[in-house]
Amino acid sequence: MRFIFVILSLCFLAKAQAQCPPPGDNILSSQEKVDAFVSNYSNCTSIEGNVEIIADLVGSGDIGAVAPPPITDITGLYFLETINGDLKISVQLDELNGFNNLINVNGDLEITSSNQLKTISGFNNLEQTRSLTIALNANLEIVNGFNNLSRIFKDLEIGNSPSIQAISGFNKLENLGGQLNISKNPKLLSIPSFNKVQRIVEDLNLTSNPNLNEVIGFEELITIGNDLNIESAKVIQGFGKLQTIERFFDIRGIGVQEIPSFNLLEDVGGAFRIQNTSIASFEGFNNLKRIGEKYFLEDWFIVSDNNVLNNVKGFGLLEKVEGFLQVQNNPMLSDCSWLCNLINNGEVTGALTIQDNIGDCINSIAVILICDLDFDNDGIANIIDEDDDNDGILDILEGNGLLDTDNDGYPDSLDLDSDGDECFDVLEAGFEDPDNDGILGSVPNDVNSRGLIINEATGYTEPSDIDANGIFDFQEATILSPGKNNILEICRNDLPRDLLTVLQGEPDPGGIWFPSLASGGNIFNPAIDKEGVYTYTHTDAICGDLSAEIQIEFISDLTPGIDTEVVICDGIEQLDLFNALKGNPSPGGFWSPALNSETSVFERNIDTNTEYTYTIVDRNCGTLQSKISITNLLKPNSGESSIHQICEFSDEKNLFELLDGEPDKGGVWSPSLPNNIFDPKIHASGVYTYTVDRGPCGTSSSTVNIELIKNNELENVHINVKDFSSRNNSIEVFVPSTRGYEYSLDGMEYQTENIFNNVHGGAQTVYIRGLDGCEFFTEEVFVKTYPTFFSPNNDGKNDVWRLENFPDVKYNIYIFNRFGVLLKHIKSNREFWDGTYKGKNAISSNYWFKLVLETGEVLNGNFSLLRK
């Protein structure tokens, strides 16, 4: 039993020691973390995730923070064999080793920003990695190792290291899925030969290494998928099997003294350039046939500015340069016969510029004459041929080889389009060319001993000069020009471009684009229009259709879509913003600000922003972005209907302000009024409807019913007079209308209150008028009063008591003391009481009276008798 326990214990221990870190990022930012990683996982040979060995930094804003101990030893990581993620190293060590057992890095291997690092070694068992980057290491001097590395799925980059002197290793590297880039290393003297590499999918860049002595090798290299760029390497040898360069062949730099023959190279898809070198002589390129056919307008052939170049041989099969050709500023080059096969049997689609050389290579005409003794191949040598190009125009009228109207390198006598307007000279001269090949008449072309085409009805007469300005039409560009072909590489996030500005030459406006652009004119909008070839055409009565093309290529297939506005109505709680974007956006981007769902789903009750940006980071075009603007719409609110009476004299009224509630702005009125203003002076009564349309969110309507009030006298006014009071006599006015009115008793001072208090007795006139100036009313009323005291002392003031401010009607007054004794009977306002009873003075006291009108109405009151 004990034996079994020991075995189980050992198994458990082995399992514990083989524990590996969980998938994810393993960031070793200090020596302590490195040691802990070694201690915990030293029996784990395969890491599922990234390993980053990057020392932490303490920023100036981290008050009180202490920098962690530096990483001084990573040799304990020897146990690692496979990293199924990235390996990123940025440490301050003199030598980088400790990875001798590492076989696979299935992510990117980066050694960067290690400023103390001088030597990289210890990767001699590494067989493959996705990419390898060694850059920005200020003191790195030596890179060696990597002797078993056979495959890099993407890029190999070694650069931006000012102290690096030598790179060795890479003896088994066969497959490179991206670019090989060794650049910006000012002290670099040598690089490996890379003699196992057969194919480089993208660029081979060896640039900005001014002290590089030699580039020797690449003996198995067959194809370069993009550019060959070598700059300033003193000796370049090898490349014996290289057959294809998809885009640029570019060797430049004053330090270059020797280049190989490239004798198996057949095709350069873009441009070819040997420029500003110290090469004295080169030969080869004898299988090179075509240059520039794959890259529209990135297509040229340049051999220029080579100060000691005196001998060139080769190019025996070169048959086409799709673009311009320049051989210039080579002050010791006197022989350009190596161009003869191209000039005699091939084609240069652009300008031919040969100048600033010497001898027979001094200019284009000299080379053409040396290469082709019978330019038009009619059996008559140029020296005695009076029409060297068989266009029906005598050479003497075309300048006899001394005139080059369009400066394209071909003299007019050897140029079928002397003014470069894309219309053949034979047509502009007024002659016939039924097969439109630029040569007089139709094939077969029979010539006489002078080299003139015979058996044709036209030709060899004075060429046309329609405007009679003394210049032949074939030497004057009067035809509307469509410009010259060009290529436009554009990103989908670029601004729209006017294609007339992209065409080369000087295109005239007014032509037609095919296919047509979304703008209907010349503007190409990369967010809307498609890539492809766009043809710009002018039609001429003599020359027919003249066209130029622009090949438009999107640098990237990625697109963020186009800016979009969306409306979310009440009741819609979620919206997938990605699906809402217009323009077929590419997946894989991210939203900012981030959505709470952590997806592209917008949740109305949680996400509060009204604008979100969708971003895709593109390798070639940078940051591609589109925006989606969100409008959250409630149900449309047109307010509440209202009824208004408006005086014919009132000021103008804004109908919107007459709506009740809180209506939304931006609606429309029906019938419409100028600026929605109702003018009572010109507009009639009626119902005006206000409608708010929220599109997908519905509509809402309310009305303003306007009654136009004329300035008429009010009817059915009721006036209530409360009088015959000892304290307060009042007049209250009732107008049967909801309109606003103001009131007055003198016709001058008005009030909005319809009650007048403490009104004086007697006749009063009540005035009414509308607040807005419309409607009026006037009526006289009588306010009855009586004296509230009298003082019969014969002083001439208040000596008797009688009714005042009372209508002139018949009445009887009965005066009583507080015991109900009748003291006085007064008939009408002609009589009074003097304050005596039965000949004696009544005492000071309160007295009561009863007033009986002839109508039977009875009024009561009391007053005081005062004696001093």
Image (cartoon, helix red, strand yellow):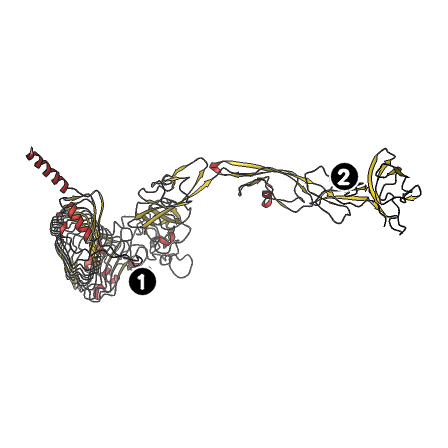
Numbered badge on residue 267:
none
Q: Is residue 515 left or right of residue 212?
A: right
Foreground residue among 39 and 621: 39
Question: Answer yes or no: do the residues labelled 1 and 2 have beta carbons within 8 Å?
Answer: no
Residue drawn where x is 42% and y is 51% of the image: 510
* Residue extending furthest toward the left: 3
Residue 175 seen anywhere in this rendered image of the structure: no
Using a 10 Å C-alpha cutoff, classify the residue at mark 1 as few (fewer than 14 neighbours), some (14 to 19) or many (20 or more). Answer: some
**Could you say which quadrant of the image residue 414 lies in?**
bottom left
Of circles 1 and 2, the one toward us is 2
Estimate the x, y position of residue 616 in percent, counting from the top left.
32, 46
Foreground residue among 606 and 601: 606
Foreground residue among 309 and 68: 68
Estimate the x, y position of residue 134 in percent, counting from the top left.
19, 55
Using a 10 Å C-alpha cutoff, classify the residue at mark 2 as few (fewer than 14 neighbours), some (14 to 19) or many (20 or more). Answer: some
Estimate the x, y position of residue 778 in percent, counting from the top left.
78, 42
- In which quadrant will I find the N terminus? top left
Position of residue 299 relative to residue 825, above or below, is below
Numbered badge on residue 719:
2
Return the residue at label 1.
403
Residue 114 seen anywhere in this rendered image of the structure: yes
**Could you say which quadrant of the image residue 49 lies in?**
top left
